[in-house]
Amino acid sequence: MSKEISLPLQFAPLLVAWQKQHGRHQLPWQNTRDPYRVWLSEIMLQQTQVATVLGYYQRFLERFPAVADLASASLDEVLALWAGLGYYSRARNLHACAQAVVRLPGGQFPRHSTELQLLPGIGRSTAAAIAAFCFGERVAILDGNVKRVLGRLLAFDGDLASSAQERQLWLHATALLPERDIERYTQGVMDLGATLCTARSPQCLLCPVNELCAGRSEPGRYPVKTRKLKRGQRENWWLWLEHQGRVLLQQRPATGVWAGLWSLPLYDDLATLKLAAKELDAELEVMPQIKHALTHFDWLLHTQRAEISQDPLLAPAGIWVAREQLADYALPAPLKKMIA
């Protein structure tokens, strides 16, 4: 159980003043009240670094300048643009959410966080960010960066693996909100977590709220979360099957890793792959292996290439794509890397 906490009332004014002078102001999704742009950035930034998101964000806006454009696109096209960002359920929810928004009155995003949470893929913190930045709603966010900032600020020792303790931190986050300047405060707490109050090597001496921070003597202790992911190991074999300049692709299942993406035929072991190649009278050539890190496991992907001359209808089910057109498909990041 977390201890009794005294809320530092000067936190919000100090943070707002710091954000005005030292915060981030030139990110492409800032300085706008367009909920489409803010929503797009918030979804992309979930578990992804700003530097990675910048290029994807720009390409999405060029192709889908408004929510209606995204809603009318095919899921394959959305996944193709998303490929490489990872966590592909975000892309599927992004597409589903856009289609839900255009069905609403006026085809507009709701203005309140409670209504935004009813849309696919929008959780409580994302809904709060959209509502605060676009509509000035006085509501707290609590993403990973903010949990770290508030966990240290308050020396909050409740285990955030517990939903009850997370709810308690939500209450503290709400109690710390200022009466005005909610947009700058929200940006400030994001900026603080991203630039100074980082997970490793926090720059406490530069922190604008250092004197208020109850956890400054041992920042590595907070936030507390005992449930840790156990990383696994996985090993598979890809078959790069080529016929007259075209490559065989298979679509991944709708759930699981790389759901809905297009991939080379994937095998659990080399023996099964060799059997498939033998049935096609194909000679195998070893290609470089790829090590790919996902959230829960490290993946070693071996690739064997074979060119067939006989009827491609005898090959495994899938579609044949010209090599120069492979980049047009929603491919997993390691396959894109290998093609490049």
Image (spheres, helix red, strand yellow):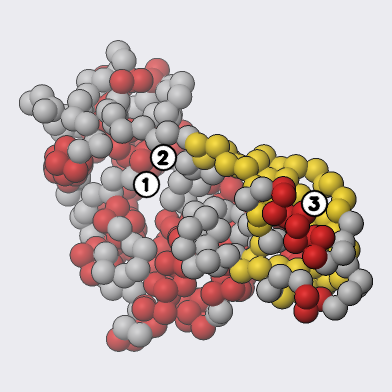
Classify residue 83 as left or right of residue 305.
left
Report helix, strand or loop for mark 3: strand
As drawn, 60 above or below 183: below
Q: Label 1 belongs to which residue?
A: 187
Residue at 75 percent across and 42 percent down: it is 289
Q: Nearer the viewer, residue 281 or 312?
A: 281
Query: Disc 3 marks which amino acid?
Result: Gln
Q: Nearer the viewer, residue 299 or 87?
A: 299
Residue 42 appears in the figure: yes
Q: Are marks 2 and 1 in contact (CB under 8 Å)?
A: yes
Cα–Cα span, label 1 and label 3: 48 Å
Query: Disc 1 marks which amino acid?
Result: Gln
Residue 111 image offset from top left, x and y in percent: 27, 70
Q: Nearer the viewer, residue 235 or 323?
A: 235
Q: Label 3 belongs to which residue?
A: 304
Q: Label 2 belongs to which residue?
A: 191
